[in-house]
Image (cartoon, helix red, strand yellow):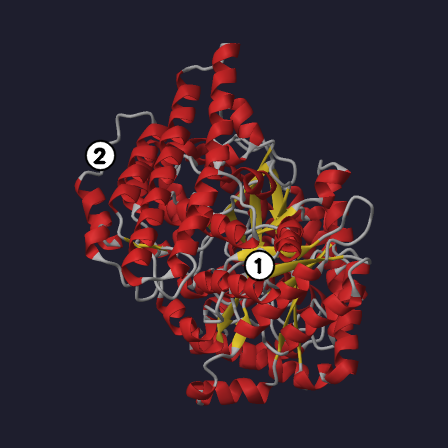
């Protein structure tokens, strides 16, 4: 293959941002949406998996397609995750369901005031990549039809099971037909323009249509096509592209051994592959992962691991974002290369620590083998490969519970009675009284979140049957149950807690300044907070400057944080959900530390109305003042078994502290310390305050500056000023 990537890159970047599609090949994304809107109820009377399959069929048969001269992968008209055609129908079916939900208005009200954020979550599916890469699309369908025949022979092919298999069959026969469309177009254009590259594209599409992938290029083509069919047409997000080095190393070695491809050719394949997601540019990035541990205890890191890191670094890609499974067996050269990339802002990487992760998974029911081979999905979450699905549909605002306790169940921002009546501030005579009131508020919010979620989660398959995803899961085929709704072995639901560290700081401030020092009464503090600290600026400054904050390695604070976190986690872990699984607690904020912060009034830690909360399991931004070692000590005081969902740590470092080989050694030591203390996930921001201030003043000079938000990177220039200011304040704090 000729080395053309550099000249093709500008075209690839525009592929999904300014798609050029021949109108003779079909409708645009918006035209399909309009067509579906005009006939949105046509499929209502069909069994839902069949109705969904018919919608899928309509989209695929009518969408415009392209095989560009600058690409190794085809172009779909349906490429915009925020404007997917199927969401027209999904929203219609969702509306039908919502009318039947007893608590739908309660969900809307809770979301409005910021008590929680609940939604129907279709964002956490991961196919069994090991199986699918062995099968190809035809093999997936063949296995599904064999399962259908077995159900018929067993007498278990009832109406629901028949609809389940019919939905899969219609969908995958449509995929076969669509792949033929792509291949035929590629061959026609190759003949017209004498373009051998398009012949190669056609051959790869035909290969994965009819059989399993047999080269790196075919495997990447299959992964890309599965992603597009699932995420952009079937509305089921693909939250990992898999353990790419482990799953593809055999093909890579065969490519080189047989001369089927060269090292340079494989690198180019990955470059073109990664550019698909760079062009799509989803806000939170596309996950994939590397590394792991083999059954014999040796590392899964291999030559392909290094190659993938090289190509990510060359592209300076924010997406795909890669999680790196690390262990004591991880080659030092690999770990240091990855850390250098993070230091130099060359990639979106997070370090997943296997020892702690295995311990947590096994404590919550996984076998040793399931823990060892677990997938990493989304931002940091772990799932049992080929056996699990999960939702993250309930996000609990811990600071609202404090507001409610201060105001006897009234939300001071909206003025509505949104919480429990746990007593007026004047009646809470001791800190234990106040703390108990806060915990009761949290318990009530969690209980409501579980009640509401249990009402709608059994109905997920009535809103969005997972026809592309289901046949990739063996248990789904065995049970003839929708893979995302209830068909996996492990069907968990996450409860994500938002603002944990800020809540700890707020509670400790109340204990100290109200009940120990008597600086202010609880009622007076309530009134001050409801005025957003107006007239009490000195008190606010005193509290903000108080060193008694989580993240500084203070035993008293850390012990309180561990007890508090255990308390709210205990409201969740092991509670049965409505899909045959259980609830799992997580300290994972996504963007809700910002979004829920906007709906939350001033809090006793000194935070002002609308400010963001603490992120993930990390301290409130700017409140960790004793260095990163103290930070890790605080965070790892939490009991990791309390958070089987995840509890990632965010670390900000100054560039001056990580320069050169000594700097890499320091970063390496931090990661290993965190791993040895049973941490789960750790990632870094490395900036000087001067750099961020300059970037804010002169954004045109810092177009490529990346910032780690939660489990993804974003451009500093794309953040609003308030978010930028928070990062600047954090950098100034650690510089001091």
Task: Please count the marks in the image.
Answer: 2
What residue is disc 1 on? 261
**CA distance for labels 1 and 2:** 50 Å
Classify residue 504 as left or right of residue 471.
right
- Local crowd size for mark 2, using a 10 Å CA cut-off: few (<14), some (14–19), many (≥20): few
Front one among 16 and 530:
16
Residue depicted at x 23% and y 58%:
22
Residue 557 visible at all: no
Classify residue 457 as left or right of residue 50.
right
Q: Residue 458 location in percent, x, y?
A: 46, 31
Front one among 613 and 607:
613
Among numbered discs 1 and 2, the one appearing first in the sequence: 2
Pointers 1 and 2 in contact (C-beta within 8 Å): no
Classify residue 554 as left or right of residue 604.
right
Q: Residue 677 location in percent, x, y?
A: 80, 59
Front one among 280 and 644:
280
- Quadrant for residue 158, please give it: top left
Residue 413 visible at all: yes
Q: Which mark is residue 41?
A: 2
Q: Residue 551 location in percent, x, y?
A: 71, 68
Q: Residue 512 location in percent, x, y?
A: 69, 67
Classify residue 434 as left or right of residue 699.
right
390 vs 679: above or below: above
Q: Secondary structure at mark 2?
A: loop
């Amino acid at each position: 293959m000729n080395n053309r990537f550099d000249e093709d890159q500008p075209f690839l970047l525009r592929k999904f941002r300014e798609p050029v599609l021949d109108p003779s090949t079909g409708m645009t994304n918006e035209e399909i949406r309009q067509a579906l809107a005009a006939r949105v109820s046509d499929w209502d009377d069909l069994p839902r998996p069949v109705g969904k399959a018919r919608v899928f069929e309509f989209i695929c048969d009518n969408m415009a397609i392209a095989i560009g001269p600058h690409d190794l992968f085809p172009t779909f008209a349906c490429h915009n995750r925020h404007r997917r055609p199927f969401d027209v129908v999904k929203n219609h079916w969702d509306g039908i369901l919502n009318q039947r939900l007893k608590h739908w208005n309660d969900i809307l009200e809770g979301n409005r005031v910021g008590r929680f954020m609940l939604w129907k979550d279709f964002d956490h599916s991961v196919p069994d990549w090991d199986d699918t890469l062995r099968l190809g699309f035809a093999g997936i369908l063949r296995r599904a039809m064999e399962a259908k025949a077995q159900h018929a022979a067993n007498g278990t092919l009832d109406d629901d099971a028949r609809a389940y298999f019919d939905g899969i069959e219609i969908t995958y026969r449509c995929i076969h037909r669509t792949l033929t469309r792509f291949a035929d177009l590629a061959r026609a254009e190759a003949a017209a323009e004498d373009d051998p590259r398009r012949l190669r594209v056609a051959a790869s599409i035909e290969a994965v249509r009819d059989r399993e992938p047999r080269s790196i290029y075919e495997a990447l083509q299959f992964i890309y096509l599965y992603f597009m069919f699932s995420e952009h047409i079937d509305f089921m997000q693909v939250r990992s592209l898999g353990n790419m080095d482990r799953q593809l190393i055999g093909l890579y070695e065969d490519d080189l051994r047989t001369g089927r491809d060269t090292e340079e050719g494989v690198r180019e394949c990955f470059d073109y592959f990664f550019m698909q997601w760079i062009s799509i540019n989803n806000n939170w990035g596309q996950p994939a992962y590397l590394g792991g541990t083999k059954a014999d205890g040796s590392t899964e890191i291999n030559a392909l691991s290094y190659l993938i890191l090289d190509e990510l670094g060359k592209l300076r890609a924010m997406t795909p974002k890669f999680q790196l499974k690390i262990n004591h067996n991880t080659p030092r050269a690999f770990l240091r290369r990855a850390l250098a990339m993070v230091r130099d802002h060359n990639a979106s990487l997070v370090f997943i620590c296997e020892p702690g992760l295995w311990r947590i998974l096994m404590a919550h029911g996984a076998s040793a083998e399931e823990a060892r081979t677990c997938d990493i999905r989304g931002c940091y979450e772990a799932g049992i490969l080929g056996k699990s699905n999960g939702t993250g549909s309930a996000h609990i605002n811990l600071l609202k519970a404090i507001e409610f306790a201060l105001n006897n169940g009234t939300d001071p921002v909206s003025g509505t009675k949104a919480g429990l009546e746990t007593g007026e501030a004047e009646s809470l005579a001791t800190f234990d009284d106040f703390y108990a009131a806060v915990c009761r508020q949290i318990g009530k919010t969690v209980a409501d979140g579980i009640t509401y979620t249990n009402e709608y989660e059994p109905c997920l398959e009535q809103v969005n049957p997972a026809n592309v995803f289901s046949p990739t899961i063996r248990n789904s085929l065995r049970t003839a149950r929708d893979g995302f709704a209830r068909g996996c072995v492990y069907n968990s639901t996450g409860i994500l807690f938002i603002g944990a560290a800020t809540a700890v700081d707020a509670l400790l401030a109340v204990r100290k300044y109200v009940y120990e020092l008597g600086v202010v009464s609880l009622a007076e503090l309530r009134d001050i907070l409801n005025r957003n600290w107006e007239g009490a600026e000195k008190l606010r400054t005193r509290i903000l400057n108080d060193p008694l904050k989580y993240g500084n390695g203070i035993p008293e604070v850390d012990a309180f944080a561990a007890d508090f976190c255990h308390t709210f986690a205990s409201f969740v872990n092991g509670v049965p959900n409505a899909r045959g699984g259980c609830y799992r607690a997580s300290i994972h904020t996504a963007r809700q530390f910002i979004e829920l912060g906007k709906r939350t009034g001033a809090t006793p830690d000194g935070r002002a109305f609308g400010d963001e909360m603490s992120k993930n399991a990390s301290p409130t931004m700017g409140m960790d003042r004793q260095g990163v070692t103290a930070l890790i000590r605080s965070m790892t005081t939490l009991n990791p078994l309390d958070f089987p969902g995840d509890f990632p740590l965010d670390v900000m470092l100054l560039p001056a502290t990580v320069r050169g080989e000594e700097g890499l050694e320091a970063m390496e030591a931090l990661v290993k310390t965190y791993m040895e203390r049973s941490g789960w996930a750790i990632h870094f921001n490395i900036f000087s305050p001067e750099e961020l201030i300059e970037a804010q003043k002169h954004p045109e000079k810092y177009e490529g500056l990346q910032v780690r938000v939660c489990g993804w990177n974003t451009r500093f220039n794309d953040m609003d000023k308030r978010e930028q200011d928070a990062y600047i304040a954090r950098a100034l704090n650690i510089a001091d």
